[in-house]
Amino acid sequence: GAPRLPLRRRLAVAGAVAGAAAAGWLYLRHEKERRRRALRLEQLRRLALGQGDFQLRDTGGAARSKADFLGRWVLLYFGFTHCPDVCPEELQKLSRAVELLERDPALPPLQPLFVTVDPERDDAAALARYLRDFHPRLVGLTGTAEQVRAAAAAFRVYVSAGPRDADGDYVVDHSVLTFLVDPDGILRDCYGRSRTAEEVARSVRAHMDAYEPLPA
Amino acid sequence: AAGMAAPTMEERKACWGARDEFWQCLDSHGDDATKCEKLRRAFESRCPQQWVKHFDKRRDFLKYKKKLETEGYHPPEAAGKS
């Protein structure tokens, strides 16, 4: 009969075959994952181009759009200066979250941003006055009614000015959300009233750690 | 831009303080506003009228929320069945 291979040799062959099968399976899985990521990347690129853009002015009068903030992480809040309580609280929280993250020099810079939903009253001067009480790097943005409307719509932020009283005063009902945008301009997360500054900072840090820049 | 400037941080804190004092008074008098008229007037003088309205609504909402949490939800009687 045909010579039999010794046991050790047979085990070695079986092991090699099993190893090759495992390697093949891992390769196929890797390929599937790679293709899934490429598709996701394509979707994200299309999203980054069209999503969350705005044409506004900062408190110095300079025109600002989303492109001006690419390359930086952004934490963005929509509010108004005549806001009774929510906006100061949310801005306090936003400022605190930024401060917490600033303590770690290994983290990339985070740009806090405030966009008014009340352009009629919140001009550059009003915004500058209001934002003085919060984080020193907080940038305020305003614009024409149409520009502000478009910016809010781009972020799906609900805005509804209430009725005016005898003094012409009114409040603006609006979604209370803080948005996290990555350096590619992609929306990564949003935080509501219930999240604390510490929770926001932790979440932002996690996103920063997981971040992979979109390939050019 | 319309009328008055937005309240400053100091003005906001004064308003919130007056509101909290008024609410504390209400809490200790079973929401009997007649027992807290002085604090009510202080609250109204320290806060813009729009904010007074806003905080009154918030108080109602907080009370309603507390009621739901302690008593549970009782749906209103339906006028007729569909």
Image (cartoon, grey):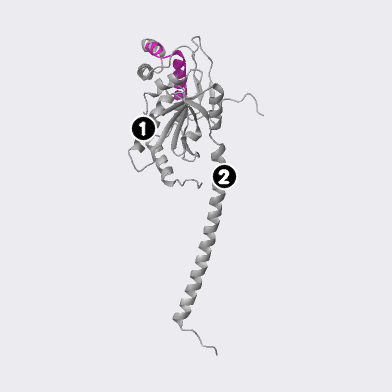
Residue A48 on the magenta segment:
no
Provide residue B6's location: percent of width, then percent of height: 43, 17
Determine contact: label 2, label 1, CB under 8 Å. no
Q: CA distance from mark 2 to mark 1?
A: 33 Å
Q: Nearer the viewer, residue A72 or A10?
A: A72
Q: Nearer the viewer, residue B64 or A182?
A: A182
Q: Which mark, by number, is residue A43?
A: 2
Q: Which residue, as the protein is rendered here, is positioned at the far right?
A: B82
Q: What residue appears at the point 52 percent right and 62 percent down from the top-left corner?
A: A27
Vertical placement of residue A93 versus A82, above or below: below
Q: Which residues are magenta?
A: B42-63
Label 1, on which residue?
A: A96
Q: Which mark, by number, is residue A121?
A: none
**Residue B16 location, quadrant:** top left
Disc number lying in front (2 or 1): 2
Q: Residues within 10 Å of mark 2 (few under 14, many from 20)?
A: few
Q: Which residue, as the protein is rendered here, is positioned at the far front?
A: A62
Q: What residue appears at the point 44 percent right and 35 percent down from the top-left corner?
A: A74
Q: Is residue A83 visible?
A: no
Vertical placement of residue B47 versus A27, above or below: above
**Residue A197 location, quadrant:** top left
* Amino acid type indicated by mark 1: Arg
* Amino acid type indicated by mark 2: Gln
At numbered mark 2, what does the secondary structure look like: helix, strand or loop? helix
Vertical placement of residue A200 versus A36, above or below: above
Q: What residue appears at the point 39 percent right and 38 percent down from the top-left corner?
A: A109
